[in-house]
Image (spheres, rainbow, N blue to C red):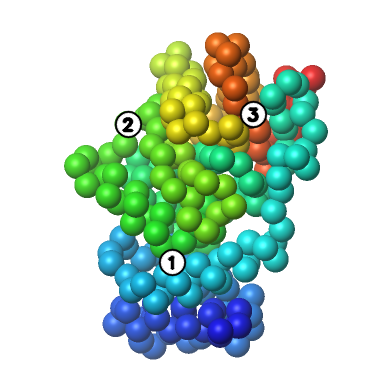
């Protein structure tokens, strides 16, 4: 199969899997087809799927990843010893572990093509990521804030994904919120160390949909990481940002 044939196969499989989609119009434009595939994957509940689908999906997603381009740590310049600042798509990073800012159901984002990092990571990783997360959640109703869970990364260029649930800010930030955010970073670092990871890339946990103030969140992130590294943990840490505002905040803090 070429990439176009894989795309058509995956869309047809997911449509045939659900009777509600039988009258769904399939666009002719390739970009719209890609959006449709991502949407169908986003809304799919964690249930068994055929090995043939996974083989085609894996080949498709790996090819998409190569076309998008990957970024190695060796391509980056450290801003401090063992610490990097990089602005871009975290799903393109070749790191031992990347951090996902998850919701407390830990199953990924079900909103089709949503702009959150949870959606981006699950979409690039593939159906298997939600299935593994569902196994983690079998014995509990929600994932506690401030803790972390590690999964395989599947079709991402990283080895692992570390999922953490940050605090949600409703009105003003409390001391408890700050402690929970610090716990997110610490828990992720500990998971990475336990798995003998040599590198970990952090997104800006809680600053998007969870409304944690960007400046304060960055200060907590930098402080927690530095304290951990001061304990002689040999980890390379990448602060991955997407927005210009976050890049400037981290640059000021780290320089």
- Residue at figure coordinates x 55%, y 11% from the top left: 231
Query: What residue sits right under mark 2 in the picture?
Result: 144
Left or right of residue 24, residue 222 in this image: right
Query: What residue sits right under mark 1 in the picture?
Result: 41
Q: Position of residue 57 (x, y in %)?
A: 48, 71
Secondary-structure class at tag 3: strand
Q: Is residue 64 visible?
A: yes
- Residue at figure coordinates x 77%, y 29% from the top left: 78
The tag earlier along the polypeptide, 1 or 2, is 1
Q: What residue occupies the far front of the structure in this picture?
A: 196
Would you call the spot at circle 1 few (<14 residues within 10 Å), some (14-19), or many (20 or more)?
many
Would you call the spot at circle 2 few (<14 residues within 10 Å), some (14-19), or many (20 or more)?
some
In space, the residues marked 2 and 3 are separated at their CA atoms by 26 Å
Query: What residue sits right under mark 3 in the picture?
Result: 236
Residue 228: quadrant of the picture: top right
The answer to which of 221 and 91 lies nearer the viewer is 91
Q: Position of residue 235 (x, y in %)?
A: 60, 26
Q: Position of residue 28 (x, y in %)?
A: 60, 87
């Amino acid at each position: 199969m070429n990439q176009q044939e894989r795309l058509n196969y995956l869309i047809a499989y997911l449509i045939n899997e659900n009777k509600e989609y039988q009258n769904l119009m399939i666009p002719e434009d390739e970009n719209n087809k890609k959006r449709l595939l991502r949407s169908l994957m986003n809304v799919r509940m964690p249930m068994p799927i055929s090995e043939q689908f996974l083989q085609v999906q894996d080949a498709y997603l790996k090819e998409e990843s190569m076309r998008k381009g990957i970024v190695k740590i060796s391509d980056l310049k450290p801003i401090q010893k063992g610490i990097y600042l990089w602005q871009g798509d975290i799903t393109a990073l070749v790191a031992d572990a990347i951090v996902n800012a998850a919701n407390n159901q830990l199953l990924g984002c079900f909103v089709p093509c949503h702009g959150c990092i949870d959606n981006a990571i699950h979409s690039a990783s593939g159906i298997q990521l939600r299935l593994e997360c569902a196994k983690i959640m079998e014995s509990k109703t929600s994932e506690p804030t401030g803790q972390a869970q590690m999964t395989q990364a599947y079709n991402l260029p990283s080895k692992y994904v570390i999922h953490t649930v940050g605090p949600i800010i409703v009105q003003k930030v409390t001391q408890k919120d700050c402690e929970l955010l610090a716990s997110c970073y610490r828990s992720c670092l500990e998971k990475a160390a336990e798995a003998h990871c040599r590198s970990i890339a952090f997104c800006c946990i809680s600053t998007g949909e969870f409304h944690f103030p960007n400046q304060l969140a960055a200060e907590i992130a930098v402080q927690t990481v530095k304290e951990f590294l001061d304990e002689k943990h040999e980890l390379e840490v990448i602060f991955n940002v997407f927005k210009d505002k976050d890049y400037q905040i981290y640059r000021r803090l780290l320089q």
